[in-house]
Amino acid sequence: MISANTYFTMPEEMIATEPVVVQPVPEKTVYLAKWSSRFWAWLIDFIMVILFLEIVYGILEIFWTVFPYWDFFHWNPFVLSLYTVIFFFYWTTMEGYQGRGQSIGKMVMNLRVVNRDGTKINYKTAALESLGKSFFPVLFFDCLIGWLAMPGTKLRVFNRISNTIVVRADYKEPHGIVYVREKE
């Protein structure tokens, strides 16, 4: 039996001379997407939706004259707002569907929109994240503020607001979270 007066001594080599800092083990590694990959995915989506709208325009032209929206001198506010709503609906539906976080452009570029912890997004989150890229004048400032005010984070303002990130989809996430930024 050990008495209260007995002291245990530790060998000298086991005593730390400097404080030991224990690094937390990340649960998951998430690879953030490059700005260039995100741009190409957006451009693919833009072209796909415009092609669809041109088909619809060709069908409706028989009944109703609609000016194409690249004809800056004949912009119709109704048509422009309709196109914006269609883009918003497209991105919200595609990225919110079953939490996949992928539009056609993101599928081609192997990208995905996820919550900041790497989990799947829902329709509400997809809608909030899509606001910035659907309204083209807002998109310019959304990206510009992201590049200048939040350098190195690879976030747009609406990514920050919706608490989402765009990640590479072809990497499997191990246990824990670590954000690895690819070189631009």
Image (cartoon, rainbow, N blue to C red):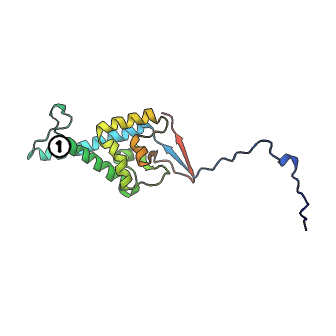
Badge 1 local density, few (<14 within 10 Å), some, or many (20+)? few
Question: Quick one: which residue is furthest to the front in this view?
Answer: 5
Q: How many marks?
A: 1
* The N terminus, quarter of image: bottom right
Asked whether 96 or 6 is in front, the reply is 6
Asked whether 83 or 170 is in front, the reply is 83
Provide the residue designation for mark 1.
78
Q: For the point 49% across and 36% down, which residue is it?
A: 152
**In this picture, residue 57 sits left or right of residue 2:** left
x and y percent of residue 113 in the render?
A: 42, 48
x and y percent of residue 46 in the render?
A: 29, 41
**In this picture, residue 94 sits left or right of residue 23:** left
SS for callout 1: helix
Q: For the point 41% across and 39% down, which residue is it?
A: 37
Q: Amino acid at mark 1?
A: Phe
Q: For the point 41% across and 40% down, which residue is it?
A: 156
x and y percent of residue 107 in the render?
A: 38, 47
x and y percent of residue 73 in the render?
A: 16, 31
For residue 175, above or below residue 138: below
Asked whether 10 or 182 is in front, the reply is 10
Question: Quick one: which residue is furthest to the bottom in this view?
Answer: 1
